[in-house]
Image (tube, rainbow, N blue to C red):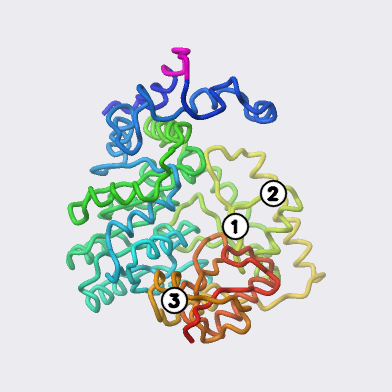
Amino acid sequence: MNQEQTPVLEMLDRFRKKNRGYFNIPAHHFETGISEKMKDVLGEKAYGIDVTETDGTDDLHCPEEAIEKAQKLAADLYGSDECWFLVNGSTCGNEAMVLSAAGPGEKIIISRDAHKSVLMGLILSGAHPIWIYPEFAERESPTAIITPGLIKKACAEHPDAKAVFLTSPSYYGICQPLKEIADICHGFGMPLLVDEAHGGHFRFHEAFPDDALSSGADVVVQSTHKTSGSLTQTSLLHLHSDLISRDRIDQSLKLVQSTSPSYVLMSSLDAARNQMAVNGRDLMDKAIKTAEYIRNGLRTAKGVYVFDEFKDRDPLRIAVSLRKTGIDGFRFQRLLFEKNITTEMADINYVLIIVSWGTTRDEADKLLEAVRRIASLRSSGKTKKEMIPSAEETYKVFRTEQRTSPREAWFSKKKKITLYEAENRIAGEMIVPYPPGIPAIYPGEVITEEIIRYLDKLRCLGASFHGVNDIDNMEIYVTEQP
């Protein structure tokens, strides 16, 4: 297909230029009803293409014209049988994957490092998760991997499971061995569903790991806004299989996507796909060189550790730690922010730096100078070194019993208590250190002493949480069932 086209963007431009009498929503009525404050910050042009479903603009929930053509162009570029535009982020894509694969009481095998949006899919579908726990190949690793052996064991023990759901790459850019895993899943007749939110750019340069679709995954979600240049909240959902129903995916998306999808967001997906098709390799090459410049600069700084042990990892993700100088990741991130450097996320040990083709050399130098100054001050002996546990040590707390399904726990009678009195109780909601958005406790799981200590440690270090209304008291809903 001709990837030079941008069907949605071109359609909206034609519609705008016709200067119609417009008696539809939205209320801002193109440029004529914009808030003056928004106009000063954003300008007028984006409002000119913010329209609704009407004659000449197609309909995301029943595409027949420009949107259908744009989705086919995306499928062609990424190598899928069919592609859907997502305007509710990869969240709705993950929900749709779970909904399309497993229903009430049915099993779905899921890696325990899944994003919290998978929980939402489990609550909506009523499916029961069979957790598999990643293993650490490297002690200093910020994240773990799922081995083919773990998948084979889970499939053999639960041959009635409807699908396998994995996250690859992780937030840190580390990939699962998807080719081997896909073969195992297919041998058991199970589709492999992959949350590839952070890997939608892999297809565009040989320095990246193999993408999920080319590795044999059946259904894949990609956050185009995270890695490929579209506006925030836009993603793609791909189907490349006959093991899962195309119609079931389409119906599931209609449940979780907005009925008023943004044409501005859809046009950004169209334009980003075009940009990647035409210039993707050159843009990624630029980003890779910038990332390597930063990585080399960090490696030479005293007291700084850069994790880059895995072969199958995204070179644009740089996990950097000052753990050896006694600085935890959350404090490191705050110190960087004080020096006017913002970073993607922090955990107990690492700060995560993400590089794109838009990252300038000036920004890279400012980052390196800030890290060197912080590491130098802290390694001079002015700060007492702290014993900071490794990611492997903290990750063990996730192993607990799933007493009821997430849906059962979510809809059960509940009461709110502090986390510190919740040991051995069944969680009625999730607690999620955010980012990266992996629940430390799921609804239906038993809250252990180890989980309580872990979450209290994160709170003391300054972590942010979803699912906690009162950070000081760490209140949580538990089921009334003891």
> Which residue is tagged 2?
341
Amino acid bearing label 3: Gly
Q: Is residue 201 visible?
A: no
Whether 56 is drawn above or below 204: the answer is above
Element carrying mark 2: loop
Q: Write down the residue under mark 3.
A: 444
Disc 1 is placed on an element classified as strand
Q: Which quarter of the figure is the N terminus placed in?
A: top left
Mark 1, residue position: 345
Identify which amino acid the numbered label 1 is placed on: Met
Q: Is residue 364 left or right of residue 55?
A: right
Q: Which residue is pictured at 28% across the width and 54% down the height?
A: 215
Q: Which mark is residue 218?
A: none
Give the x, y percent position of residue 272: 43, 34
Which residue, as the protein is rendered here, is positioned at the far right? 382
How many discs mark residues in the rendered view? 3
Q: How many residues crowd mark 1 within 10 Å: few (<14), some (14–19), many (20+)?
A: many
Determine the CA span between mark 2 and mark 3. Answer: 39 Å
- The crowding category of the residue bearing disc 2, from other C-alpha atoms within 10 Å (few below 14, some 14 to 19, many at least 20), is some
Q: Residue at x 70, y 45 (%)?
A: 366
Q: CA distance from mark 3 to mark 1?
A: 28 Å
State the extent of the magenta-drawn residues as a range. 14-22
Query: What kind of residue is marked 2?
Result: Ile
Residue 170, quarter of picture: bottom left
Query: How far, Cα to Cα, is label 2 from label 1?
Result: 12 Å
Bin the neighbour count of mark 3 within 10 Å (Cα to Cα): few under 14, some 14-19, many 20 and up: many
Dot 2 or dot 3: first in sequence order is 2
